Each structure stands twice: as structure tokens, then as C-alpha cells.
């Protein structure tokens, strides 16, 4: 029987693991299919306190994992979580076909990239459509070619900046006429000679007649209604995220977009279940706020265990 199981290994999950491990609770961390979470796919993180020169997202997460393991956290790498029974304590998880019981659960499952949602996007994934410039931007097919980034937030700006290393020109297609991104990111992008913003426009299709590779995006100006085809070799979609909470539907309180809604602090509507990070946060969604809520969830779990004499 486990005392604490943490689902997810991003900033929230690993910070919860550090705190729970330092409380001698020997937590188990189910890393999921992307150990380290979404931050491992980003480039330099410039706003995580304590790193004045910035730190690579991957390195930051490796460091957090080592820190958690140093105090006794146990990683279950890449093993799929198949089912969860929260109807009574101990909670029962099915992980890679095996049954696991736990007194408390910290859910830190994060969020995944939102898709634009049309057929050709799916059919052309990995043939020029991607959700991660850091992962895929250096592919030969993108070298010295015009590339498209969709979105107007920090992610889109980060992708566009990164892609200037590879593409001949980067078109940033945004549905409004001002960026949502933080000021420093927006200014950097708009000042870059290789980046051209395409305002008030949405992508309505991604083209290749034979679906062999991306050759263009069809874009529509939302003010004039005019549609044009913009030739490009790659489409980098950065239009936000959806929370990874499907497994808990019907068990735990969530809002209409699937974000978990704690009853008090990090405590969910079922005593013994706590939540941290982007799966419950559609407002701040920062590495540091995820880490902070992971800390809070671990402290709440520890206090809960003490209150039920475990
Ligand atoms: P975001 O801030 O939610 O921005 C998503 C962007 O996509 C918005 O500009 C939105 O347009 C647009 N969008 C949403 N759905 C769309 C659709 N169906 N079609 C076309 N455009 C669509 O998401 P994010 O950029 O991934 O950032 C998420 C969080 O992570 C933010 O809090 C951000 O600050 C943080 N982040 C920080 C850094 C950093 O500091 N280094 C880097 C990356 C992300 P509207 O603007 O019109 O809503």
C-alpha cells in the first residue's frame, strides 16, 4: 500500500514528489508517456527563478527528477495509467495491468497541445504539421523553407523565434490583431526580420493535394472573409492546451473545459485526492506556478494523512 501516488512528472508532479519524499512518504511518481512533461519540449526557460542565464527545459526537469529521487521518490517510467477507482480509500489504480493501492493521490497530469481540429491537420501530422518546434524544427524538410506558426500566445512566439534558425521566413498567423504573448516575447517576435505576422487570420485548411507533405496553408481573413493560400513547408500549431483529465470525468469536479476544480486549496471533492499544475490551472500556467501548486498539494496530502492517522 502506497501513502502517496503522484500522477504526472512535470513541474507540479516532481515538486510534489520532492516535498512528499522529504516528508518520508516515499511517493511513487507515474511519469506518463512524457517524463518531465511539456517543459522538456521547450527551449530555454528564461523566467524560472534562480537561473539568471536561463535554463533548458529538459535540463530543468532532469534536475527536478534527480532532486526528488535523492529524497526517496520512486519513478515508474512510461507505464500507462489505465484505470482509477476513487470510490473509496485506499484508491485503486491500474498501471500497466498491475493493481496499485494508495491512501492519497496527487493529480498533476498537465495539459496537451490543442489541435486546430480539421482532417488534413491529422493526416499531415509528422509530414509537416507539428506541435513542437524544439522537437521537430531542425528536420531537413524545414530548412530554408517558409514556415507557418499558428497562434498568438507565448508558445507561438517562442516557436516562431526558434524557427528563425531554420526557416527562410516565418509567418505567424493569429486570429486577432494583437498578440496575447507577454510583452517581451511579443516585442522580440515583431522586431525579428524573418518573422511576418499575418493578423486577423485563421487557418482553414492545410494543403497538399496528395497528402504527402505540407505545401501551403489556406488562410481566411476574419475581417474581410477573403481566403488565400500561403505556400509553406511546415505548420507549427501553438494554439493553447487542453487539460489531461479525461480519466477522471464523472469522478472529480471539473469545469466545462475539463480543468479540475479543487474544493479547497489543492483538495478535490474526494478526500485524499489533491491536484496540482496545469490540469487545474487555465489562468497562470507557468512552470513556477505549477511547481508552487505541487508543493502545496504535497503539504496538503501530508496533513491529510496525519489527520487520518496514516
Ligand atoms: P495561450 O496563452 O492560451 O495562447 C493560445 C493562442 O492561440 C492565443 O493567441 C489564442 O488566440 C490562439 N488560439 C486558441 N485557439 C485557437 C484556434 N482554434 N485557432 C486559432 N488560434 C487559436 O497558450 P500558450 O501560448 O500555449 O501559453 C500557455 C501558457 O504557457 C501561458 O500562460 C503562457 O504564458 C505560458 N508560456 C510561457 C512561456 C514562457 O514564458 N517562456 C512559453 C510558452 C508558454 P487569442 O489570443 O485570440 O485567444
Image (cartoon, rainbow, N blue to C red):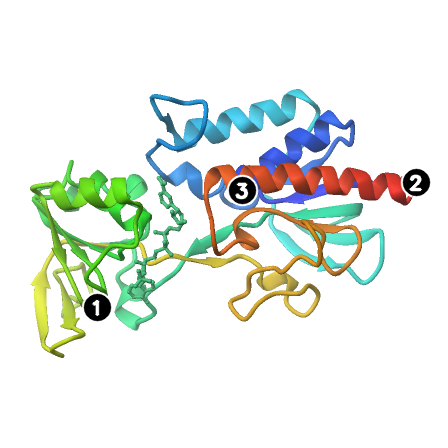
- What residue lies at 65% left-to-right and 62% top-to-bottom? 248
Quadrant in which residue 72 is drawn:
top right
Instruction: Judge: label 1 CB < 8 Å from ligand 1.
Output: yes
Q: Is residue 36 above or below residue 256?
A: above
- What residue lies at 84% left-to-right and 51% top-to-bottom? 90
Residue positioned most to the front:
183
Return the mark for residue 290. 3
Question: Of the residues under marks 2 and 1, which one precedes in the sequence?
Answer: 1
Q: Percent x, y for residue 299?
A: 72, 37
Q: Nearer the viewer, residue 223 or 111?
A: 223
Taking the image as four quarters, which one is ligand 1 found in? bottom left
Distance, label 2 to label 3, CA atoms, is 28 Å
Mark 3 near mark 1, Cβ–Cβ under 8 Å? no
Q: Nearer the viewer, residue 27 or 11?
A: 11
Disc 2: which residue? 309
Any part of residue 277 in sight: yes
- Taking the image as shown, residue 134 lies to the left or right of residue 166, namely right
Any part of residue 36 in sight: no
Instruction: Judge: label 2 CB < 8 Å from ligand 1.
Output: no
Quadrant in which residue 194 is drawn:
top left
Which image quadrant: the N terminus? Answer: top right
- Taking the image as shown, residue 42 lies to the left or right of residue 23, namely left
Q: Percent x, y for residue 22?
A: 72, 25
Q: Percent x, y for residue 74?
A: 68, 31
Amino acid at each position: 500500500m502506497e501513502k502517496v501516488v503522484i500522477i504526472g512528472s512535470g513541474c507540479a508532479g516532481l515538486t510534489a514528489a520532492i516535498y512528499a519524499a522529504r516528508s518520508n512518504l516515499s511517493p511513487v511518481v507515474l511519469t506518463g508517456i512524457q517524463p518531465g512533461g511539456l517543459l522538456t519540449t521547450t527551449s530555454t526557460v528564461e523566467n524560472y527563478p534562480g537561473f539568471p542565464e536561463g535554463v533548458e527545459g529538459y535540463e530543468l526537469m532532469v534536475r527536478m527528477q534527480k532532486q526528488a529521487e535523492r529524497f526517496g521518490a520512486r519513478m515508474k517510467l512510461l507505464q500507462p495509467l489505465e484505470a482509477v477507482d476513487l470510490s473509496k480509500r485506499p484508491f485503486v489504480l491500474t498501471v500497466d495491468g498491475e493493481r496499485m493501492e494508495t491512501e492519497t493521490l496527487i493529480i498533476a497530469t498537465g495539459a496537451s497541445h490543442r489541435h486546430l481540429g480539421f482532417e488534413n491537420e491529422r493526416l499531415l501530422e509528422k509530414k509537416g504539421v507539428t506541435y513542437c518546434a524544439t522537437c521537430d524544427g531542425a528536420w531537413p524538410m524545414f530548412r530554408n523553407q517558409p514556415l507557418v506558426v499558428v497562434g498568438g500566445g507565448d508558445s507561438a512566439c517562442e516557436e516562431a523565434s526558434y524557427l528563425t534558425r531554420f526557416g527562410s521566413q516565418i509567418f505567424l498567423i493569429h486570429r486577432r490583431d494583437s498578440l496575447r504573448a507577454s510583452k517581451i516575447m511579443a516585442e522580440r517576435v515583431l522586431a525579428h526580420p524573418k518573422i511576418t505576422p499575418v493578423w486577423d487570420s485563421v487557418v482553414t485548411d492545410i494543403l497538399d493535394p496528395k497528402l504527402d507533405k505540407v505545401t501551403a496553408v489556406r488562410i481566411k481573413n476574419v475581417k474581410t472573409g477573403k481566403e488565400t493560400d500561403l505556400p509553406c513547408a511546415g505548420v507549427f500549431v501553438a494554439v493553447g492546451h487542453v487539460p489531461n483529465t479525461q480519466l477522471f470525468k464523472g469522478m472529480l469536479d471539473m469545469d466545462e473545459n475539463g480543468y479540475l476544480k479543487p474544493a479547497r486549496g489543492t483538495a478535490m471533492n474526494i478526500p485524499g485526492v489533491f491536484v496540482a499544475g496545469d490540469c487545474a490551472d487555465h489562468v497562470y500556467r507557468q512552470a513556477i506556478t505549477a511547481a508552487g501548486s505541487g508543493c502545496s498539494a504535497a503539504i496538503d496530502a501530508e496533513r491529510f494523512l496525519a489527520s487520518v492517522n496514516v
